[in-house]
Image: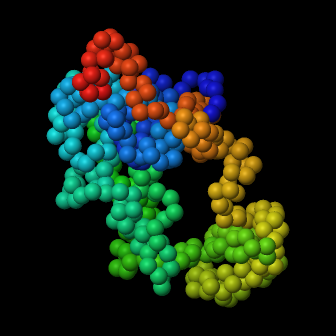
């Protein structure tokens, strides 16, 4: 964490978040890292189900925690008053949940017309599957990425990161900012409807276009992506894996020169481009044989000097030790009352004029309830004590 010396990009924006687990909290944290005030509303005595996991400390850093029971009329009224002070509401309940409690977006906008409501769900707020339950892994399968991940002779493999949750959170934050900009022109808020699977599908590239032209699904192909050549990972002499991606003609020429085989550019197996694609296994075998005679450091130095994109396949330990990650402030140590100092990724993106920051670690359950109710809703100590006694907060 570091001190902010310049104004925050989203200073003055208030976010109320009822988000749980990953996608919605992550969306809210992204906004908070650039200056928005984020108030997380949780069930009294229960809280976000993800509180038991270390990831909670990262995906809720910098926010405030307020406890309100949304199941009862008094809590719903309190929540409505809180939303009246806000610019953005972020939620990821099953579609229709807020409406069932009488605090759906349209109802909230009766008293706060400018409220932007970010709604994240497995399948979206409309469509025949809107009521289906959906988590990250289900969304990955529905979006098609699981089908194409892995080797053709084995079952599909899930990607190693939570692509749907974090992708949806990122798109949701973008949508919130777009809706805020639209509000400047219309004076009214709107809903931002994000489905987990759609975030992944939007990042699928030309899968739809390829199928539309050929009528054939793209199948699993291991590390080889059809048409992207040469691009593979190879084992070095000292037992590391190195990824090389030299898929433009100029990069291919530099690669061939770097491994001492400039004649490969004119080899009829590898030119024109159609021949290179047809013989991708041959060119990868040649590159792999060269890499196998060199150490990782020798390979990296050679390819860096030649301008060939290449890197070791990093484990987390490599990332934490790498000076480039440190120079870019991509390794933070954030204090957490339960776990102590926790290593976390830095703020992305970097804004040169109004950089983001992590203001503090994740909050304890209800840590800011009294302060928020007193400050924003002007409730006195007696009123707050009464709410607590009635288990509204």
- Residue at image position (47%, 78%) is 220
**Towards the viewer: 364 or 117:** 364
Q: Is residue 227 visible?
A: no
- Residue at image position (19%, 31%) is 72
**Towards the viewer: 158 or 391:** 391
Q: Residue furthest front?
A: 389
Quarter-of-image position of residue 7: top right
Is 346 situated above or below 223? above
Q: Quadrant of the C terminus?
A: top left
**Towards the viewer: 113 or 275:** 113
The color scheme shown is rainbow
Is 207 situated above or below 278? above
Question: Where residue 141 sits in the image (x, y, percent)?
Answer: 37, 67
- Residue at image position (32%, 33%) is 44
- Residue at image position (26%, 17%) is 386
Q: Is residue 292 visible?
A: yes
Q: Quadrant of the N terminus?
A: top right
Q: Residue furthest bottom?
A: 268
Question: Where residue 64 sits in the image (x, y, percent)?
Answer: 44, 29
- The mark tally for this picture is 0
Question: Where residue 197 sits in the image (x, y, percent)?
Answer: 35, 58
Is 306 situated above or below 16? below
Q: Is residue 76 left or right of residue 282?
A: left
Quarter-of-image position of residue 207: bottom left
Question: Where residue 170 sits in the image (x, y, percent)?
Answer: 45, 46
């Amino acid at each position: 964490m570091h001190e902010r010396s310049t104004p925050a990009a989203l200073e003055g924006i208030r976010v109320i978040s009822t988000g749980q687990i990953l996608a919605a909290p992550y969306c809210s944290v992204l906004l908070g890292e650039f200056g928005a005030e984020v108030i997380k509303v949780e069930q009294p005595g229960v809280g976000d189900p993800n509180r038991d996991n270390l990831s909670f400390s990262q995906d809720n850093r910098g926010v405030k925690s307020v406890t309100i029971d949304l199941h009862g009329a008094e809590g719903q009224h309190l929540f409505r008053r809180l939303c009246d002070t806000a610019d953005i509401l972020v939620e990821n309940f099953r579609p229709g949940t807020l409406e069932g409690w009488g605090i759906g977006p349209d109802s909230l906008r009766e008293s706060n017309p400018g409220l932007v409501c970010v709604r994240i769900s497995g399948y979206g707020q409309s469509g025949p599957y809107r009521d289906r339950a959906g988590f990250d892994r289900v969304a990955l399968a529905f979006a098609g990425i699981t089908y194409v991940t892995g080797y053709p002779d084995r079952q599909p493999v899930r990607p190693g990161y939570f692509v749907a949750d974090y992708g949806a959170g990122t798109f949701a934050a973008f949508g919130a900012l777009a809706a805020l900009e639209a509000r400047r022109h219309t004076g009214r808020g709107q809903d931002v409807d994000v489905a987990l699977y759609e975030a992944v599908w939007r990042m699928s590239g030309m899968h739809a276009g390829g199928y539309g032209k050929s009528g054939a699904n793209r199948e699993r192909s291991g590390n080889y992506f059809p048409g992207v050549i040469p691009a593979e990972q190879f084992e070095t002499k000292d037992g590391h894996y190195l990824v090389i991606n030299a898929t433009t003609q100029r990069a291919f020429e530099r690669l061939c020169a770097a491994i001492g085989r400039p004649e490969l550019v004119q080899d009829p197996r590898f030119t024109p481009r159609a021949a290179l694609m047809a013989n991708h296994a041959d060119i990868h075998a040649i590159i792999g044989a060269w890499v196998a005679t060199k150490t990782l450091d020798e390979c990296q130095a050679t390819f860096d000097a030649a301008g060939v994109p290449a890197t070791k396949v990093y484990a987390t330990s490599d990332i934490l030790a790498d000076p480039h990650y440190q120079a870019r402030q991509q390794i933070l140590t954030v204090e957490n009352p339960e776990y102590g100092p926790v290593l976390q990724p830095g703020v992305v993106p970097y804004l040169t004029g109004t950089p983001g920051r992590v203001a503090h670690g994740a909050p304890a359950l209800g840590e800011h309830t009294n302060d928020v109710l007193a400050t924003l809703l002007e409730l006195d100590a007696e009123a707050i004590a009464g709410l607590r006694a009635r288990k509204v907060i």
